[in-house]
Amino acid sequence: MKKIIIPIMILAILVAFFEQVSADKNVYITVGAIVVFMFGMMQLSAKTPSKNQEKEDKDV
């Protein structure tokens, strides 16, 4: 899954950057690319363990 998400995120950011450089900017394409990127970041960060997870385990 990680191998699929990272290239999609890179492609989305490249589309957003190239859309901003063009003469006639389309806001909807930029917003769509940012949404795809943020969704990918959410998927990747969901697998990162919490910093305070050890403290919570010790308190229980």
Image (cartoon, rainbow, N blue to C red):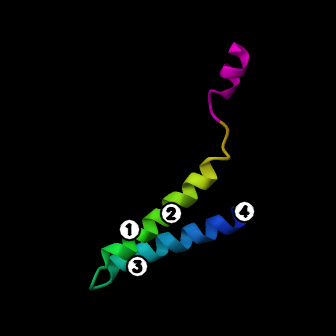
Check disc 1 and report the residue beneath it: 31
Query: Nearer the N terminus, badge 2 or badge 3?
Result: 3
Instruction: Work out how far the residue at label 4 is from the one at label 2, CA to CA, in angstroms.
Output: 15 Å
Label 3 environment density (alpha carbons within 10 Å; few <14, some 14–19, many ≥20):
few
Question: Majority secondary structure of the magenta segment?
Answer: helix
In which quadrant of the rendered view does residue 31 lie?
bottom left
Residue position for label 4: 1
5 vs 14, nearest the viewer = 5
Q: Amino acid at mark 4?
A: Met
Amino acid tagged 2:
Phe
Q: Which mark is on residue 22?
A: none
Q: Position of residue 14 (x, y in %)?
A: 48, 74
Q: Taking 7 as reference, is 39 above or below it? A: above
Tell me where the magenta segment starts and ends, as one range: 50-60
CA separation in Å, label 4 and label 1: 24 Å
What residue is disc 2 on? Answer: 37
Q: Are marks 2 and 1 in contact (CB under 8 Å)?
A: no
CB-based contact (under 8 Å), mark 3 and mark 1:
no
Could you classify mark 2 by the number of other residues whose Cα lies within 10 Å: few (under 14), some (14-19), or many (20 or more)? many
Q: Earlier in the sequence, mark 4 or mark 2?
A: 4
Percent of width and height locating residue 37 = 51, 63
N-term-proximal mark, 3 vs 1: 3
* Separation of residues labelled 2 and 1 (CA atoms): 10 Å
Rendered location of residue 46, percent (x, y)? 63, 47
